[in-house]
Amino acid sequence: MIAAPVKLSENEKYPIVFIRTPYAKANARDLKFFCQQQLSYLSRGYAVVFQHCRGTGASEGDFIPYINERADGLETLKKIRQLPFYNAEIFLTGQSYLATVHYAYLDAAPDDVKGAVLLVQAIDRYHFRFRNNILRASSAGWHFTNFRQKSLRQKNYKVNFFRTLPLAGMTQTVFGEKVPVIDDMLKSSDPADEYWQTEAGGAGFKKALSNYKFPILFVGGLYDIYTGENFKMWNSLSPEQRKISAMIMTPYDHSPCTRYHAKRHPIDFENGSLDKVWKDFRCDFFEYCRNREKKLEFITPGNITYYSLWENKWITEPFLADGTQKLTLFPGNRTLQKASGNGEISYLYNPENPAGFPGGCNYSMGGMAEQPPPDFRSDVISFVSDKFEKTVRVRGKMSAVIHVKSDREDTAFYLRLNIVKGDKTYCLREDIMPISKQHPNYQPGTAVPLDFSFIEHAFVLEKGDRLRLDISSSCWPTFVPHTNLKGDRFYHTSSKIANNTVVLNNSSITLNVL
């Protein structure tokens, strides 16, 4: 589809906004927003080229996620240059997979691409599919629902199929045939596996930011599935690239510009919607790309602009850096306290009956949803702090060291950190870790430390708030349940119940604060 601001005449030239998508269907709300956005480009004097990816919508062929985007994108750029109104200025934009299609060829650094606004997407694909060797079911499911979406209409997909043993049979179950390109992904649980060094595994995408020379506005959400990788991308830019680019981190999730889902985000943060505080940010940023002297109203190039939750303010800094002081709390007798706890707390973890937590923090689409009460299951152990006596501003990464033991050669431990405000509890961050990741030769019954790392955050603990730490061994369907067997789950034919223990002595959680 091609759209231009006014009726074209033979000599008129326009800057062109280039959009590619694999999504041919949209609900009424999404379609309305899309049309409004195109009208915004047109009203500002831009032409729009909109294309369905190969094998989607009106395009021919098969849609194999990621595989053809570089070649197809570069070929379409050639076609754009042949349009009669092409003025040698192309601008890229897209959200989620619509940003992926541009990352696929960014390292080619076409001279006529003058700028980009890319939302909620990252270039390292392993971390979208796995966390510490554990498969992210809710994320990997996207591959199944979109693979060959036009030519393979008969799909028998349910998220529960990720609990199939062995997982090696899942593509046969879903598609009626084995699909090697997906099987290779599912069995590559280690980031060092050869698959992640191939084009199918996204090796080419890792070069996306190596050579670009035009300004990029990266937009993410503090509760998005790409948040951690977005921060890594920003930190990896060269000083020259960062100087002309910027990043925005909103308080929301994979729909970062507004509080799109009230259930995912029960709190409508004051001035937290980017669409309200900077309504036409895409076109404004493109205008800056055309004239670097133009002052932007909401951001400063070279910086991240992020929202601090419950402080209810936007902050602009070169990086979202760790706070300069440490606040360390220790799990005790169901409390988070100022001194190290003593004793042990054990529970049975059954992979056939995994725990589930509302919300997603950063590894599923769930957002900062309201949480159930402490100890809401026998395999969820909760530790709650006293009320904070004064305001504490938390910045950057948080971490934990939890000492654990199990009667199995391998198992997993899951942590979720929450904020308690009155009678409401909201999730902040989460992490999961199999024992074998840090202790490959673990001996059952031995107490060992596990290190957990939480993705950057910015929030305020107000006077009267509490922190709550939940420890379990599963979070379904965010993560595929660990079988309590050593080795790759892709090949496991059975699972076992584990008796898992949290050892309180020397276990701790640390926040970086201002």
Image (cartoon, helix red, strand yellow):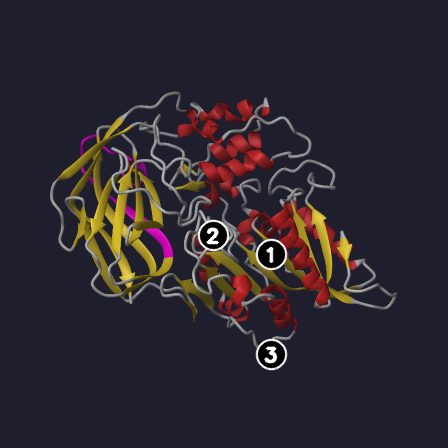
Q: CA distance from mark 2 to mark 1?
A: 27 Å
Judge whether residue 434 is colored magenta: no
Q: Is residue 15 above or below residue 448?
A: below
Q: Nearer the viewer, residue 208 or 164?
A: 164
User: Disc 1 marks which residue?
Assistant: 107
Q: Is residue 60 above or below residue 322?
A: above
The secondary structure type at the circle numbered 1 is helix
Residue farthest to the front, as pictured: 423
The residue at 65%/49% (across/down) is 31
Which x, y percent locates residue 440?
29, 36
Q: Is residue 198 above or below residue 242?
A: above
Q: How many marks?
A: 3
Mark earlier in primary sequence (1, 3): 1
Amino acid identity at mark 1 = Asp
Mark earlier in primary sequence (2, 1): 1
Task: Give left or right: position of 373 versus 65.
Answer: left
Amino acid identity at mark 2 = Asp
Category of crowding for the residue at label 3, using alpha-carbon neighbours closer than 10 angstroms: few (below 14), some (14–19), many (at least 20): few
The residue at 57%/42% (across/down) is 199
User: Disc 3 marks which residue?
Assistant: 293
Task: Give left or right: position of 142 versus 160.
Answer: right
Residue 118, image quadrant: bottom right
Which x, y percent locates residue 298?
52, 71
Residue farthest to the right, as pictured: 10
Span highlighted in magenta in the image: 436-456
The secondary structure type at the circle numbered 3 is loop
Q: Which label belongs to residue 253?
A: 2
Amino acid identity at mark 3 = Glu
Tell me the mark number nearer the camera, choosing from 2 and 1. Answer: 2
